[in-house]
Image (cartoon, rainbow, N blue to C red):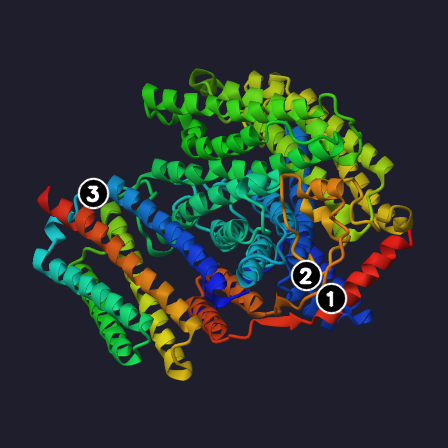
């Protein structure tokens, strides 16, 4: 069986996995939609929404997706010199995004708005936190693949693995767009 | 101390009759097995040939062994429930406390659905799907072994409360909120429930993805989708449902755990939590799940009917469409489990009508099976009997289901024993009889000899008679107003007689199950009489019969080429199935223990989370991740079986065929 055939299979499986993960997010979005008014006298999304901060967060994540795309292009051209720096930038931006999200969480908690205070806050922390956890997994994953490349070079197998990691990263970007729209923007206007 | 042991104290160790009994039974069994293996010196063999194996045939057999053990466990719970209900009337409060009774019926439901039916299904799928589509393996052998061992980890967690903690969830099998929150269930029982289902659910999800990849990408040349055997088709639909609903289960249980662990408020009664949301989410998983259980069985019936009526299946295309119909309608009927929630007349009407719609594709299947039998030369052997038993029982269960789907009727019957009788009729009569039919049908393929027919007939009749003796009274009791999960009732209700008849039915079913054990033991002893040396004992139609029984580890020396439906039947007709061919090298996946290690970490992680031993949980997360990273660095996951070796095995099989 050829490597290509095998990779086709794995890619199909990975797409199905992404859809299952998307369903997990779908549940969390639905739960958020149901609970977003259940603030129980506590803060609302309107009160904790800091537009410039979240916009910067979003732009950072979008840029990381862009550099990830550039890295994949370089990878397909077997241009290791271009690919590695682009991935490093992607990782850096991912970590900055995570740090900003953690800062936002810490800020909310320090003001007494932690997840035990209302159903809305539970749903908010869970939805955004699950996304953040995925970003962390993505960062670890890409780091390990970079080690692969360092040790073994850019083989067809590693390229296949990189493609999946790239898909994962873009997928997280798409999910964030929905979080940005549904949680922050729609919360901010209403 | 609390940092090291979390909530675990000396008090958590067994000190009641059932925990001491359970712990004793588990320990004795383990010591017994360990001694036996040491005695026959098979540890190494067990490790190399079974535990680390990625062969789906072996994993399939292991699935079925674990499922059988869990069936015994679940049946004991059933007996306890029945006995309590027959005894606990008027002044007598039976032999179980209310709390203990609740734990027993919770465990019964969880075990029967997650660990028995799902276990048998994944066992049969693992063994048969690659054979039916002419493949040598599943798309990802690694996911397969990991999924299996996660299922085992879940099964261990669900029984671990005997040893540590002594209490299981007392919440019903779906742990309905807010009852399952810390406010009403502060103990570890519900945590055992969450982590056990989370672990095995993850395994199921992996299996679902794997089977879809396998069926879509690894079919033999010439086998188009519309040439696939029906068992493969219905399993594909079932696996599509699995990947749609198991993420919902994972997310829902995770939210419940967040409530329980971190004091969040998704499903609590205070601070804005919404308990009905839990009910909605869990049934969005729970209702389609019963179709996951039953669809592969429908596929088995299709194979059995056309093989034993010796005709090709009537209405193949409509059967496939019906499977899709059932699969898709199943996703939009969940609310019929709680018409009484108060969502309003229109919502109830929608879900009621959708539910009755399911009877249409189900009816199509029944009609197609009947027309397949029409003018066929039917052989009334074991698998066919189970099919006939199913069709009567399932029509009965389906009709009571349609009755329950009518919201006004449901307001009367909701959570009554009528409902309990209904879903047992469909799941036992539909899914379980299908599994029995499948095991009897494929037993010669798996073992190389047929099961004893006469004992099988006895077992079948005991089952079917016992079934109606035990569940008909429940229908009547339900109509009389007996609710489910009743640990005690008043003597003036006059229910006790019916409950006692029901227990007698249970005893008849149990003797049927014992008869099945005897059947297997006797068949093994007399195996030389029933040997299947041809690989095709029933004059079968599909590819699994084209290889020897039991199949060699690579399934097919040469991947068969398919030209039509009922591929093997066609080959036999054209005389192309015995054609000589050259043997070539075959690539097979290497054994791996990493799936086992990952599941081991998952098991300890679940245990640590139940007892709030967070340092241990962290260690397990790191351990699991490290195992996965090690796997990504392993490029040599396959080895080559040389052509000479394959020729040797094949010639031996051909010689064996000639000698009989």
Q: How many marks?
A: 3
x and y percentages locating residue A39 in the rendered image: 20, 44
Residue A40 seen anywhere in this rendered image of the structure? yes
Residue B320 found in image quarter:
top right
x and y percentages locating residue B319 in the rendered image: 56, 31
Q: Chain of mark 3?
A: A
Q: Chain of mark 2?
A: B
Give the vertical position of B177 relative to B194 (above or below): above
x and y percentages locating residue A155 in the rendered image: 42, 76
Asked if the residues shown at circle 2 and circle 1 are in contact, with their CB atoms under 8 angstroms apart, the answer is yes
Label 3 sits on residue: A40
Mark 1, residues whose alpha carbon is within 10 Å: few (<14), some, or many (≥20)?
many
Earlier-in-chain disc, 2 versus 1: 2
Give the vertical position of B600 relative to A187 (above or below): below
Give the vertical position of B57 relative to B617 (above or below): above
Mark 1 vs mark 3: give the one in front.
1
Q: Residue at x 69, y 72 (%)?
A: B642
Q: Are marks 1 and 3 on the same chain?
A: no
Q: Which dot marks residue B205?
A: none
Label 1 sits on residue: B646
Q: Which dot marks residue B554?
A: 2
Give the vertical position of B46 relative to B488 (above or below): below
User: Depth check: B480 or B370 in front?
Assistant: B370
Q: CA distance from mark 1 to mark 3?
A: 70 Å
x and y percentages locating residue B225 in the rendered image: 53, 42
Asked if the residues shown at circle 2 and circle 3 are in contact, with their CB atoms under 8 angstroms apart, the answer is no
Instruction: Decide if residue B209 is on the left or right side of residue A183.
Output: right
Q: Chain of mark 1?
A: B
Element carrying mark 2 = loop
């Amino acid at each position: 069986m050829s490597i290509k055939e095998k990779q086709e299979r794995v890619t199909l499986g990975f797409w199905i996995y992404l859809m299952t993960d998307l369903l997990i997010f779908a549940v969390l979005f639905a739960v958020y939609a149901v609970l977003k008014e259940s603030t129980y006298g506590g803060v609302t999304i309107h009160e904790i929404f800091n537009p410039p901060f979240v916009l910067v967060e979003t732009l950072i994540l979008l840029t990381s997706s862009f550099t990830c795309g550039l890295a994949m292009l370089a990878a397909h051209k077997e241009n290791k010199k271009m690919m590695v720096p682009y991935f490093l930038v992607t990782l850096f931006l991912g970590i900055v995004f995570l740090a900003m999200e953690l800062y936002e969480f810490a800020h909310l908690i320090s003001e007494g708005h932690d997840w035990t205070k209302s159903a809305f806050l539970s749903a908010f922390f869970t939805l955004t936190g699950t996304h953040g956890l995925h970003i962390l997994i993505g960062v670890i994953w890409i780091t390990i693949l970079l080690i692969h490349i360092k040790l073994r070079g850019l083989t067809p197998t590693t390229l296949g693995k990189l493609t999946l990691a790239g898909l994962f990263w873009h997928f997280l970007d798409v999910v964030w767009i929905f979080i940005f729209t549904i949680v922050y923007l729609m919360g901010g206007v209403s | 101390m609390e940092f090291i042991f979390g909530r675990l104290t000396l008090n958590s160790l067994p000190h009641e009759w059932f925990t001491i009994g359970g712990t004793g039974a588990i320990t004795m069994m383990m010591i017994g097995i360990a001694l036996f293996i040491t005695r026959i010196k098979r540890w190494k063999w067990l490790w190399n040939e079974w535990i680390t194996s990625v062969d789906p045939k072996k994993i399939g057999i292991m699935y079925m062994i674990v499922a059988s053990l869990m069936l015994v466990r679940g049946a004991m719970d059933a007996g306890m429930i029945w006995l309590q209900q027959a005894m606990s009337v008027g002044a007598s409060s039976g032999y179980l406390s209310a709390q203990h009774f609740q734990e027993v019926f919770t465990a019964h439901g969880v075990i029967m659905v997650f660990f028995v039916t799902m276990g048998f299904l994944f066992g049969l799928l693992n063994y048969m799907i690659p054979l039916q589509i002419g493949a040598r393996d599943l798309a990802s052998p690694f996911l397969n072994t990991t999924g299996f061992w996660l299922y085992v980890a879940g099964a261990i967690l669900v029984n671990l409360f005997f040893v540590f903690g002594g209490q299981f969830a007392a919440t019903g099998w779906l742990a309905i909120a807010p009852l399952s929150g810390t406010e009403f269930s502060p103990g570890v029982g519900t945590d055992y429930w969450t982590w056990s289902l989370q672990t095995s659910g993850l395994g199921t999800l992996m299996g679902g993805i794997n089977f879809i990849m396998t069926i879509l990408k690894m079919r033999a040349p010439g086998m188009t989708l519309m040439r696939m055997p029906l068992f493969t088709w219905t399993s594909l639909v079932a696996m599509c449902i699995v990947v749609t609903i198991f993420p919902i289960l994972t997310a829902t249980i995770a939210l419940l755990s967040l409530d329980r662990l971190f004091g969040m408020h998704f499903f609590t009664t205070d601070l804005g939590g919404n308990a009905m949301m839990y009910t909605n989410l869990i049934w969005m998983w729970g209702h389609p799940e019963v179709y996951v259980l039953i669809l592969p069985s429908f596929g088995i019936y299709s194979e059995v009917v056309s093989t034993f009526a010796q005709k090709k299946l009537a209405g193949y295309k409509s059967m496939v469409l019906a499977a899709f119909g059932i699969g898709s309608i199943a996703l939009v009927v969940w609310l019929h489990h709680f018409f009484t929630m108060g969502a309003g007349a229109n919502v109830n009407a929608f879900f009621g009508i959708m539910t009755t719609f399911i009877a249409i594709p189900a009816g199509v299947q029944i009609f197609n099976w009947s027309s397949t039998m029409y003018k066929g030369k039917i052989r009334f052997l074991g698998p066919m009997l189970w099919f006939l038993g199913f069709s009567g029982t399932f029509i009965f269960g389906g009709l009571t289901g349609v009755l329950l789907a009518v919201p006004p009727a449901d307001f009367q019957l909701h959570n009554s024993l009528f409902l309990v009788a209904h879903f047992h009729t469909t799941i036992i009569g539909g899914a379980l009889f299908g599994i029995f039919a499948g095991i009897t049908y494929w037993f010669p393929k798996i073992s190389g000899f047929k099961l004893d027919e006469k004992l099988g007939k006895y077992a079948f009749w005991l089952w079917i008679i016992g079934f109606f003796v035990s569940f008909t009274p429940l229908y009547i009791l339900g109509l009389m107003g007996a609710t489910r999960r009743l640990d005690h009732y008043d003597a003036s209700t006059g229910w006790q007689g019916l409950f006692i008849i029901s227990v007698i039915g249970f005893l008849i079913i149990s003797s049927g199950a014992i008869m099945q054990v005897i059947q297997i033991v006797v068949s093994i002893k007399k195996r030389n009489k029933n040997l299947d040396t041809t690989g095709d004992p029933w004059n079968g139609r599909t590819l699994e019969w084209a290889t020897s029984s039991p199949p060699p580890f690579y399934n097919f020396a040469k991947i068969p080429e398919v030209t039509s439906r009922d591929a093997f039947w066609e080959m036999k007709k054209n005389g192309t199935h015995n054609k000589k061919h050259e043997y070539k090298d075959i690539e097979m996946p290497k054994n791996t223990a990493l799936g086992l290690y990952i599941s081991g970490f998952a098991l300890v992680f679940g245990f640590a989370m139940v007892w709030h031993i967070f340092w241990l949980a962290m260690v397990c997360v790191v351990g699991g991740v490290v195992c996965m990273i090690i796997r990504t660095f392993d490029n040599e996951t396959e080895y080559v079986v040389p052509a000479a070796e394959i020729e040797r095995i094949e010639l031996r099989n051909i010689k064996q065929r000639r000698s009989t």
